[in-house]
Image: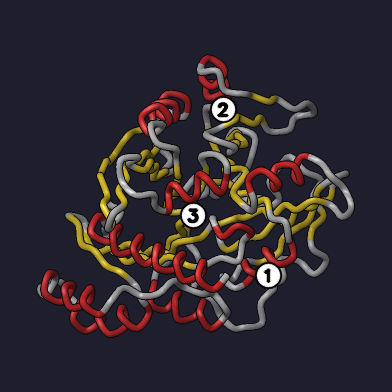
Amino acid sequence: MNQNPSAVAYTEIYAADGPAAVAYFRRYGFTEVATATGADQHSTLLEAGPVRVIVTTPAARTYGPVSEWLARHGDAVADIALYRDDVEQVLERASAAGLGVHRPGQGGPAVVQGLGALRHTMLDLIDVDPGDPLVPGRAWSPVQDGRRDLSDEGRAEPLREVDHLAVCLPPGELAATAELYRRVWDMEVVDSQRIEAGPTAMDSLVLRDALGVTYVMAEPDPTRAPGQVDEFVKGHGAAGIQHIAWRVDDLVEAVTGFARRGVEFPPAPPATYYEDLAARFAGTPGLPAQLPDLQATGIVLDVDHGGTLLQIFTRAPHQRGLLFYELIERRGATGFGERNVVALFEARERDLARLAAAS
């Protein structure tokens, strides 16, 4: 069996403009695999190596659950589908915790209501092969010419896995949400931190399960100025996924190649950030020589006990501008770049301010 490395079967994104969203994902080298059309929605399944995304949009001239969801929340992640070998136990724990559990007939996968407006489709590893691109639960029609590459902009650095999913929560919900995911999905809290960026502050917990699914959950400090976590919750109307982080093998190459294909990135950290890197990590093998590439691409870097971590956020043209993506390269590092977080979030804050001024 071809085990999916992260155990995330797919992320499903509801988008008001499905073709535009599909066109955006092609810039990362995603390939269209199949489509499925229902009475009130149309879905496109895309694949980049082991990473799968489903883009779902309302069917033309209809108003149904997807349209209603989009009216409330805007373009966003609606489903994180998970491969599990203990689906029945998860469903029992979810029911005991008071979460909504839907068991469709005719052998379809069960669905558990997650945090905010998010749901989790549960795919049983006993019955489902993660190597099968046509994930169950819909009447997929394979693309006529196979897994055609939708892009003509040249080679893309391959995505390796979903590294983590970043969650924004309303103030006061972090501890309860983390405990819920710990109990229902048997996750472990592996890190905690407080992040202060200018006048804003937030607290976060990192949760991971035995198969590697990782959530970075954050809530804002209500005694400080509102920041991007507050903005996400307000604009989305609930807790939800703020960004998806994809791991690559060579981040400099990925940023360079994706930029040629039309992926946009927020403003880079100031030059002083890279001057500080040179001073702090002068003894790190290969770093001095790579600093010009990092500065040219806007990549941030940190070092932990396991190795080096490279990160960058990307821009996405989704409705309301709340959902975006992260690219990450791990050279042995196991953390999330505690010293990167402020630089990343300050870059995101500058980007939001620039976009607001231009609108």
Q: Is residue 36 left or right of residue 348?
A: right
Badge 1 crowding class, 10 Å Cα cut-off, few under 14, some 14 to 19, many 20 or more, is: few
Determine which of the numbered discs, if any, sits on residue 244 in the image: 3
Q: Say what amino acid the circle numbered 2 marks.
A: Val
Residue linked to disc 1: 23
Classify 156 as above or below 339: below
For discs 2 and 3, the disc positioned in front in the rendered view: 3
Q: Residues within 10 Å of mark 3 (few under 14, many from 20)?
A: many
Q: Which residue is mark 2?
A: 87
User: Which numbered circle lies on residue 136?
Assistant: none
Hey, which quadrant is residue 309 in on the image?
Answer: bottom left
**Secondary structure under the numbered disc 3 in the rendered image:** strand
For the question of whether residue 289 can be seen, the reply is yes
Give the CA distance from mark 1 to mark 2: 34 Å
> Relative to residue 206, is residue 113 depicted above or below?
above
Disc 1/disc 3 C-alpha distance (Å): 18 Å
Identify which amino acid the numbered label 3 is placed on. Answer: Ile
Q: Position of residue 158 (x, y in %)?
A: 51, 69
